[in-house]
Image (cartoon, rainbow, N blue to C red):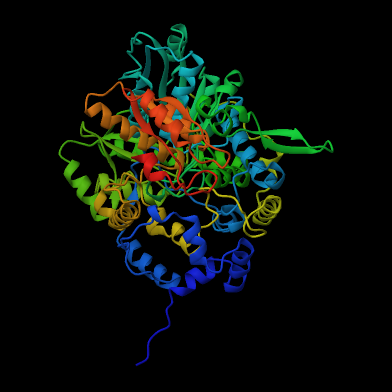
Amino acid sequence: MFSDPDSTLSFSRRHIGPGPEASLEMLQLLGYSSLDAFVNEVVPKSIRTTHPLTTGEPVGEYDLLIKLREIASQNKPWRSFIGMGYYDTVTPPVILRNILENPGWYTAYTPYQAEIAQGRLEALLNFQTMVADLTALPIANASLLDEGTSAAEAMSMFHAIKGRPARATFFVSDTCHPQTIGVLRTRAHALGIEIVVGNHHAAELPENCFGAIVQYPATDGAVYDYRSFIEQVHAAGGKVVVAADLLSLTLLTPPGEFGADAAVGSTQRFGIPMGYGGPHAAYLATKDEYKRHMPGRLIGVSLDSRGKRALRMALQTREQHIRREKATSNVCTAQVLLAVMAGMYAVYHGPEGLLEIGARVHGLAKALAKGLETAGHSLVHREFFDTLRVKPRAGTMDTILQSAATHCMNFRKFEDGTLGVSLDEISNAAEVNFLLDVFAPGHAGGPNGGKTDGAKDQSYQGSMKRTSSYLQHPVFNSYHSETEMLRYIHELESKDLSLTSSMIPLGSCTMKLNATAEMIPVTWTEFSRMHPFAPEEQAAGYALIFNQLGEWLGDITGLPAVSLMPHAGAQGEYTGLLVIRAYHESRGDKHRRVCLIPTSAHGTNPASAVMAGMEIVLVRCDSNGNIEVTDLKAKAEQHKDNLAALMVTYPSTHGVFEEAIKEICA
């Protein structure tokens, strides 16, 4: 009987570099006759699992892509007008092909060694300059994980600047995105900060208020003038962070010009697909006097030993790998690939191109607003950028929603019966006319009956009109043709070390080990154009992936539940510590706050524990990085009444599987 050769062998053969001869040579040099003998020596028998994994039969790359196509087909990427910080966008093909799909960019290592990372450092400097210019604040970091996290980081920064007072309150405008409010509540609880959510128009600032956050434009699209509110907060001794939409800042007065102390937000709509919520690069910009309190990477311009211009990671003494529990944050590299793409989007379009995109989106929103009012609907807000909050004409809501569903459209539904409609970069006149037909069949029909032939009036004439220039640096005004951009991208790529030029013998949670077959589906429409707040029934493919991956990780780790929410390893640490904290609180043991951490641990470990509101007690390690069990026992006994957790890295930061791990965890 004929049988197919095992196609699954091709994956390991293609992705484990050393062949049998090279492996044997290395093993013999180490004094071992086989790989099994080596594993028996390195991985203690006491910790090896004996049960077979239930992850199913392996498949080869070709079969994997067929299966993923089947899963992707279960997603239904309707046209989403939901907004809430996520918008459809156009990834310029020159960026898609030469950055997102290019291993020269996605396999490069964390830029700790500046001399082999000059290309990425320049791309990140472009990102920082873009953010600083658009927000009109003097300094910006080299990206964060998402908008909610960046808002929480700004809150923590203000709290630290204030001296981390024991009694502290942070005011949150109810016009902020709900997901941002949720993240702020979580982060604040662990730090003992009280969150007060309210109407910034009529707010009496709470006692002990050290800061506040507002959304610009608001989550429902309204454009507010926050000057008087910011003055009120400043008069009370607090600071204000503005969560701002970067594209809107091409038309609207930037936060730095109306008194903001910091600005945060997402760069998703700068050419990064929605991807059902991520990953996307967020940003944080602030005043120069706060730079030593900033979280995340900061790229600076310096001189090398020959006096030539060189780039480096600046002010690293703020960061977790040096300051550990005294760091400003547990954030590490933070979405560099996506930050590079967003920065290159600004380089490619330049100030005129970005203004054209922003003005076009705004003009289409104005045309839609006019058509809706002509059809008898009402607008809740008169000033907006790209999002309308619509009060449908009496008796039309059900018809509107039914028509939207028929035409595969998603709107945002507010509790008061209004609808949110957000336009974006891919919107056009035909789409506006289609929306008018959905909201008012017949009213928008006829020769001129409410229909628009495009956004003739694209200018913003509201109270927050921007008058200052931005992106005047030559880098944003030199590469606007595809060939110029192509050459610039590859010039920077050639200055970096990646798997395209060398092995990278360093352990990390970077993308350098991702196979090409794993990267290909990332850009498929069924995955990339899903809005994170689309109805769950439209994302059945994603649900299948989440459920399968959760089951597999549970089986591999031997744990009963898995969360896929953390956007990075450090955020996973933080989430785990919050779970432990919540467990103790559920038992009435709120006093348990001590976390034991070995001195050899990665810097994110103590930084995450501090963010989780825990007290760090260090456990000694020997010269090989192994935990000194006697010291661990002594510290555990000393703090037994307040002990919350032990946090270990396994294998250790030194790459060693400690034989005493079961005793350590017992």
Residue at the bottom extreme, as displayed: 1
- Compared with 378, 169 (above or below) is above
Quadrant position of residue 174: top left
**Where in the figure is residue 245, as x and y percent of width and height?**
46, 34
**Where in the figure is residue 361, as x and y percent of width and height?**
46, 41
Residue 430 visible at all: yes
The C terminus is located in which quarter? top left
**Where in the figure is residue 307, as x and y percent of width and height?**
83, 35
Please name the residue shown 67% across and 59% down the image. Answer: 501
Please name the residue shown 43% across and 9% down the image. Answer: 232
Residue 469 visible at all: no
Please name the residue shown 69% across and 44% down the image. Answer: 118
Is 604 left, or right, of 148 in this rendering? Answer: right
**Where in the figure is residue 640, as x and y percent of width and height?**
33, 25
The N terminus is located in which quarter? bottom left
Q: Decide which of 113, 387 is in the foreground and name it.
A: 113
Quadrant position of residue 574: top left
Please give the count of numbered marks on the rendered protein: 0
Residue at the front extreme, as displayed: 630
Q: Decide which of 339, 466 is in the foreground and name it.
A: 339
- Compared with 15, 404 (above or below) is above
Residue at the right extreme, as displayed: 306
- Compared with 196, 1 (above or below) is below
Q: Decide which of 402, 537 is in the foreground and name it.
A: 537
